Amino acid sequence: MKLQYSFKTALAGLNTNKRRSMLTILGIVIGITSIILVMSLGRGAQELIVGQIKSMGAKTILIIPGRQPKGPTDFVGSLSDTLKQREYDALSRKVNAPHIIKIMPIVFGSEALAYGNETYRATVFGATYTFGSMHNVFPSEGRVFTEEEIRTFAPVAVIGSKVKSQLFGENDPIGQNIRIKGNNVRVIGVFGGKGQVSFLNFDEAAMIPYTTAQRTIFAIKYFNRLMVETDREENIPSTVQDITTTLRNLHNITDPSKDDFFLQTQAQAMATVGAITGALTAFLAAIAAISLIVGGIGIMNIMLVSVTERTREIGLRKAIGATEKDILTQFLLEAITLTGVGGLIGILLGASLSFVASLILTRALGQAWLFSLPISSILLGIGVSAGVGLLFGIYPARQASLKSPMEALRYE
Amino acid sequence: MPPPLIEVRNITKIYQDDGVATAAVNGVSFTIESGEFVAIMGPSGSGKSTLLHILGFLDRHTDGTYRFEGKTIDDYSRLEIARVRNKKMGFVFQAFNLLPRVSVLENVKLPLLYSDIAESQWDTMAMKAIAIVGMEHRVAHEPAQLSGGEKQRVAIARALVNDPELIFADEPTGNLDSKSGQMVMNALQKLNADHGHTIILITHETQTAEHAQRIIRVRDGKIESDERVTSRRIATTQFVK
């Protein structure tokens, strides 16, 4: 029998028992739905993090004081004061690091901001005037501070949209003084809702000159970060070397494991994130795959019942000329069609759920969570569901094909 | 001269059940020529059904020789046996064995699915077979909507759709009232007389058997008698549409 007729026959067979067919594929639907959901959300999370890392810029290197954290609970490393003006000056010298074109010190901390009777705890972020424009964040009202204001320790701030609404409501904040740790700071600009960019949420921050932050607000001598910009992306690796050598010499470090600073580049951060989210996604998808095995056993069970129930039909088909292969094909196609349809429903369901999840996450996180449905997940979904049908359908189909045609002639 | 359609020489079928050997068919010989209408008659347990299974290539005998068109079952591969059943044999069963929830037309077309006949001819062939048994008015119905007699006529149409040389009818009237039974016998006689199909009828009733031209009586796996019917019954009840 030609395959197309086998397929039609299989469809007709499933059609005669619609409700059972639907219930049978439920396991497969759930399994594929979870796989698609996990893969889609995994990809979404990866894109979100990668997007944040990219906003750091491909030509920049972040120098972080302290030793590199060994795990999520290892925060001792970040409480360090190893980056000071001395380090800044050393890196500024062309002989030490010829490809560095700019060094931007960053000082930050969490402080209560007050205006009138309103207070709001936000990130006080001391940076250079270029930090915003580097990340494509520009004030929607007012202006950013100038190089002159950095040099003169000017108490001026560009506040985020959330800070503005919390302290000023609908009022115009430009020119008003807010208090930070007892210091009057004049608002000169507002960043429109930009959300998380790089490691800073602009909405919930007040950006001030790093000099003001260091001396006036926090009264510290060190920097929390040094952001280094190189002339070209290709010079990142050599500059990483230059910075490492310079700082080690400066701190008399001979054993690399004793480093009191570490460097982050976009490429390196992306590789790390890719590896982590990839492993996590694969792990979760593998757990979801267990439900497919359960679903497959369900299919096999129902197919065996179906074969027994349809002994007469099988016998009849054989009596009128069906070969063993015809019967095998018919029942195998029934199983594969069942799982295939289950897979398709699972893909649609998984995609819809992950789309809804992306909307919810976008609201909850306050930043765009992109819905993405990797083509690989669709192919995997179809392939796996058909494979499950083939794997768990072969035994019942074989049982069917071996049935004797005499059964049909036997009178009950 | 071509070989007879069916040539049975001394065939025996022994079933092994828990070490006890039972001979369901025990040294049976006969010949059936193309175009005959033969009834194989006997009480239940006489071995007539086993004989039918052997003749229809559904089962193998344990001893003796059975030639269908001059060839034994061992001359064919399993694939070829399926082909022979599809092309040269048609089966009508006591329990009809129609596929549920599938129309009359689709049921009749079933053997064509397993043939090498082009799909474009299927409908024409099926309609022709349905017309022979007078079921044109029920083409789109499902078996559940038909009476027993109608179901059996559909089953006959299915058996003859491929225009087989030989039609086996296994107690075709066993589940039917006498009027429906008459209609079925009428259809079988028509197939034999007008269309030249060889018919082998299995039955336990003398009355039904007397619609054939010849009766082979079996008892305890052996042939009791093999004789022509002298006063053959002719089923006159026409199809009621």
Image: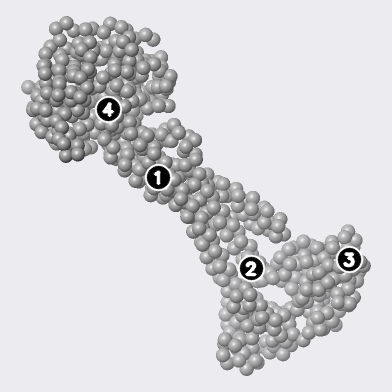
**As shown in the figure, which amino acid type bears the numbered disc 3?**
Glu
Looking at the image, tell me whether mark 3 or mark 4 is earlier in sequence order.
Answer: 3
**As shown in the figure, which amino acid type bears the numbered disc 2?**
Lys
Name the quarter where the C terminus of chain B is drawn. Answer: top left
Q: CA distance from mark 3 to mark 4?
A: 91 Å
In the image, what residue occupies the spot 18% across and 19% down? B42
Label 2 crowd (10 A; few <14 / some 14-19 / many >=20): some
Looking at the image, tell me whether mark 2 or mark 3 is earlier in sequence order.
Answer: 2
In the image, what residue occupies the spot 64% across and 88% down? A247
Checking the image for residue A409, the label placed there is: 4
User: Which is more toward the observer, B155 or A52?
Assistant: B155
**As shown in the figure, which amino acid type bears the numbered disc 1?**
Met
Q: Position of residue A135 (x, y in %)?
A: 71, 69
Mark 2 against mark 1, which lies toward the viewer? Answer: 1
Same subunit under labels 4 and 1?
A: yes
Q: Are marks 2 and 3 in contact (CB under 8 Å)?
A: no
Name the quarter where the N terminus of chain B is drawn. Answer: top left
Q: To which residue does mark 3 refer?
A: A118
Looking at the image, tell me whether mark 4 or mark 1 is earlier in sequence order.
Answer: 1
Chain bearing tag 3 is A
Mark 3 against mark 1, which lies toward the viewer? Answer: 1
Q: Position of residue A22 (x, y in %)?
A: 49, 39
Mark 2 against mark 3, which lies toward the viewer? Answer: 3
Q: Is residue B148 left or right of residue A115?
A: left
Whether residue B199 is situated above or below residue A151 in the rendered picture:
above
Checking the image for residue A300, the label placed there is: 1
Q: CA distance from mark 2 to mark 3?
A: 36 Å
